[in-house]
Amino acid sequence: VKQRLAGTAVERPAEQQGIVSASIIPDPKDENKSILMLAGGKLQKVMNVLNPYPEYFDFLRIYSSDVHDVIATFGVEVAYCIFRDDVKGVFGSHNVAVDSRHISLIADYALASGKWKAFNRNSIMASNTSVLHKMSFETSIKFLINAVVKHDPEGLKYPSSRLMLGMHPELGVGAGFEVRNTGTP
């Protein structure tokens, strides 16, 4: 496999191709297989090179740090899982305990549209009108003063703004539902 990879023609340097680095590590669950870890993109191209070797690579255990590439290759659900696990890993490496539900909320926000959306202050501010949602980031006084001066309304439709007031978000298990009595026990 290493010879096949070494013999693969690359027209431009790897950085321009999207692959920053690639590592082949032993699979802890199966000593006869390996895990391919990519930093960067071009996952589909790499998989095409490795496709003749299914006995060495479990294609269900390929990892890439490029969320856009994972979405294009495997779909948003796989990207969601990788993103969620990466965020857990970052906090875990610093011994910071974070409830998995909070991490899932971040992953839901970042991938809800089926495309990657950055989860940072600039992205939130550009796409959101909720004053309380904006205040959940580090510049809360600024947003509160601007909202009061501009008479910005708060519709309480975003999960973070509802959670700040002790309300359930109106999505998932917090969404409204109707209970009907069907007459049978």
Image (cartoon, rainbow, N blue to C red):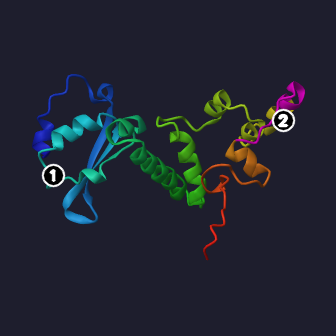
Magenta stretch, residue numbers: 146-157
Q: Is residue 95 left or right of residue 52?
A: right
In the rendered image, which residue does mark 2 sit on?
144
Q: Is residue 62 above or below residue 126?
A: below
152 relative to 30 in the view: left or right: right
Q: Position of residue 76 (x, y in %)?
A: 42, 42
Residue designated by label 1: 54
The image quadrant of residue 45 is top left
| Residue 137 part of the magenta segment | no
Return the x and y of residue 185 as percentages of the image width and height.
61, 77
> Would you say residue 153 sits in the magenta stretch?
yes
Q: Amino acid at mark 1?
A: Pro
Residue 18 bears which disc, if any? Answer: none
**Helix, strand, or loop for circle 1?**
loop
Q: Position of residue 71 (x, y in %)?
A: 39, 38
Q: Is residue 66 left or right of residue 61?
A: right
**Residue at 41%, 35% in the rendered image:** 68
